Amino acid sequence: MGALAIRNVHKSYNDTTHILKGIDLEIEAGEFLILVGPSGCGKSTLLGMIAGLDSPSSGSIHIGERDVTNLPSKDRDIAMVFQSYALYPNMSVAQNIAFGLEIRKVPKPEREAAVQRVAQMLQIGHLLDRKPGQLSGGQRQRVAMGRALARDPKLFLFDEPLSNLDAKLRVEMRAEIKQLHQRTRTTTVYVTHDQVEAMTLGDRIAVMKDGLVQQFGSPADIYRRPANRFVAEFIGSPAMNMVDASCHGGVVAAHGVELELTARQRAALSVRGDGDLVYGLRPEDIKLADAGLPGELTMIEPTGPETYATVDTAVGSLTARIPGLLAAQVGDRVQLQWSAEDAHLFDRASGDRVAGS
């Protein structure tokens, strides 16, 4: 059994509100698991059940060899970092970090040693005598993490810990959390709605929607072979281009334009048969070229290191992610090119990836 096992967990608040619809996940010791998805998908509800703040309507949760489904939080050997920091304003940083240990009646010398250990790890030793009101947002988040680290638990839980920080600080804190996990190798479950956080932090990612796990795998697996259209559009920025197309006799076309396929894709479609498809292309896989699908530039969005170029074509509006600055103007005629190896095929009705493609 892994460090955390979630088995067929359902959660209903009444007969009409079914929040979780059968979640099955197993996380190995030392893994960093990301629960990601849009608001209302059930990720925070699931985290609360792992923490013991709520109970499943059915199913079970195991931490290590123990079934903790009905255990209170204090008996689960977990530590949680909240979005709101949840620091005691009348206590110093050192007292906030040590508070959980004090409640558990850990001897004072051990508490003081733990405070010094995590303060050094998080580079907040110079802040130990300050109160939370004297700290910046990033410093307060470090103190909240320090309080969790002082526990040395079996499981760390993070509930959108960076959502209250500005963009620059989010990037810095994201790197610190990753480095912290690399040093401690404590099993971690981290909730976010930010797909960049998910891709950069997680060993494995569970993409959730409507109370179900849509795909569970490594960041590379989810990026390269999304299980369905939802995952394909949710992971990646800008979102994957989706072209409505049809397959007839092994030929895939959209608005009269034949779309290139690999031998593997043709074989998958021969098994599937004719029907409506969605042909997906990530913006970073589309290039401006001297030959290809013609179109008109309708929007240019320079970001500095790259430019997002939106092009109106015969198959619809496509966005390309171009390295550097683009020497073109809105209204220019351009041509787009891509490799069939980079195309993703989805069933239009179900949204599922075409098997074998």
Image (spheres, rainbow, N blue to C red):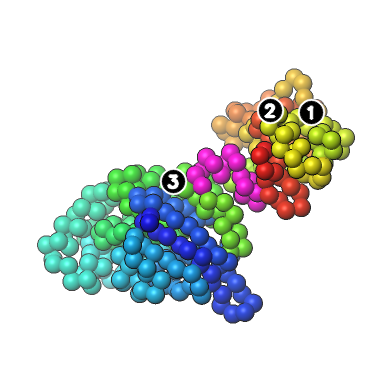
- Which kind of residue does numbered mark 2 sit on? Ser
Q: Residue at x 23, y 49 (%)?
A: 120
Q: Nearer the viewer, residue 143 or 41?
A: 41
Q: Return the mark for residue 203.
A: 3
Task: Classify 10 Å Cα crowding around label 2: few (below 14), some (14-19), many (20 and above).
Answer: few
Mark nearest the camera among 3 and 1 is 3
Q: Nearer the viewer, residue 248 or 173?
A: 248
- Residue 117: x and y, percent? 20, 52
Q: Which residue is mark 2?
A: 339
Chain-order first, disc 1 or disc 2: 1
Q: Which residue is mark 1?
A: 293
Pointer 3 and pointer 2: residues touching (CB < 8 Å)?
A: no
Tag 1, which secondary structure?
strand
82 shown above or below 262 = below
Which stretch is magenta? 217-234
- Which kind of residue does numbered mark 1 sit on? Leu
Chain-order first, disc 3 or disc 1: 3
Q: Residue at x 67, y 38 (%)?
A: 357
- How far apart marks 1 and 2 lie (CA) works out to 12 Å
- Which kind of residue does numbered mark 3 sit on? Asp
263 inside magenta stretch: no
- Residue 45: x and y, percent? 50, 67
Task: Classify 10 Å Cα crowding around label 1: few (below 14), some (14-19), many (20 and above).
Answer: some
Work out which quarter of the rendered image holds the N terminus and state it. Answer: bottom left
Q: Return the mark for residue 88.
A: none
Q: Residue at x 79, y 42 (%)?
A: 273
Judged from this view, the residue extending furthest toward the left is 109
**Left or right, 203 with reference to 275:** left
Tag 3, which secondary structure?
loop
